[in-house]
Image (spheres, rainbow, N blue to C red):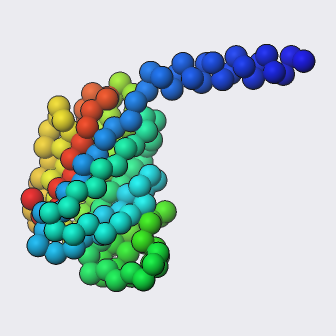
Amino acid sequence: MAFPAASSVHLVLLAAFTAGASAATFTIVNNCGFTVWPAAIPVGGGLQLNPGQTWTLNVPAGTSSCRIWGRTGCSFNGGSGSCQTGDCAGALSCTLSGKPPTTLAEFSIGGATDFYDISVIDGYNLAMDFSCSNGDALRCRDSGCPDAYHQPGDRKTHSCSGNNNYQVIFCP
């Protein structure tokens, strides 16, 4: 009966490790004069965000290679449809990256340090601000935005201490 004891030890260690980590809260705001369909992977999926509406998304610590982007020109019937920009295989709740062009908010929620950036490598479709509660505010108003990655190898990644909150604003 060594297995139950070993499993109990692993559960206690897992609980202790998880207690030290916390989620980051992302507030996603649509300041556009039109509906935006934000998407988020690997957590969040996607939804409809009318002008002036906000979506709050909790991202667990240890979540890496994340993306948030705004889809435009969408039409959905239930959970399927299409978007003119940022479409993710016709799904309302995305499980894969959107089809270019997409202005991307990219991030990894670590523990002691988080990393975040804006990318227009996959094209530009919406003005966006992306900020950490105690870090740099990144701004992207057009396809030439200086705060964004334009090609692989650009050095535009920013860091923020862990346990912070973030804000993504479309059409700031």
Does residue 122 appear in this view? no
Q: Nearer the viewer, residue 46 or 142?
A: 46
Does residue 2 appear in this view? yes
Q: Judge whether 88 appears above or below 74 on screen.
A: above
Q: Position of residue 52 (x, y in %)?
A: 15, 63
- Say left or right for 86 vs 127: right
- Say left or right for 33 vs 163: left
Which quarter of the rendered picture does the N terminus lie within? top right
Which quarter of the rendered picture does the C terminus lie within? bottom left
Location of residue 122 by image quarter: bottom left
**Residue in the picture at 28% in, 46% down:** 26
Q: Judge whether 85 appears above or below 153 on screen.
A: below
**Residue in the picture at 54% in, 18% down:** 16
The furthest residue to the right = 1
Q: Position of residue 148 (x, y in %)?
A: 19, 54
**Residue in the picture at 31% in, 69% down:** 48
Q: Nearer the viewer, residue 127 or 147?
A: 127
- How many numbered marks appear? 0
Location of residue 113 by image quarter: top left
Q: Position of residue 97 (x, y in %)?
A: 42, 64
**Residue in the picture at 24% in, 49% down:** 27
Q: Position of residue 157 (x, y in %)?
A: 26, 42
Q: Judge whether 102 appears above or below 129 on screen.
A: below
Q: Judge whether 127 appears above or below 13 on screen.
A: below
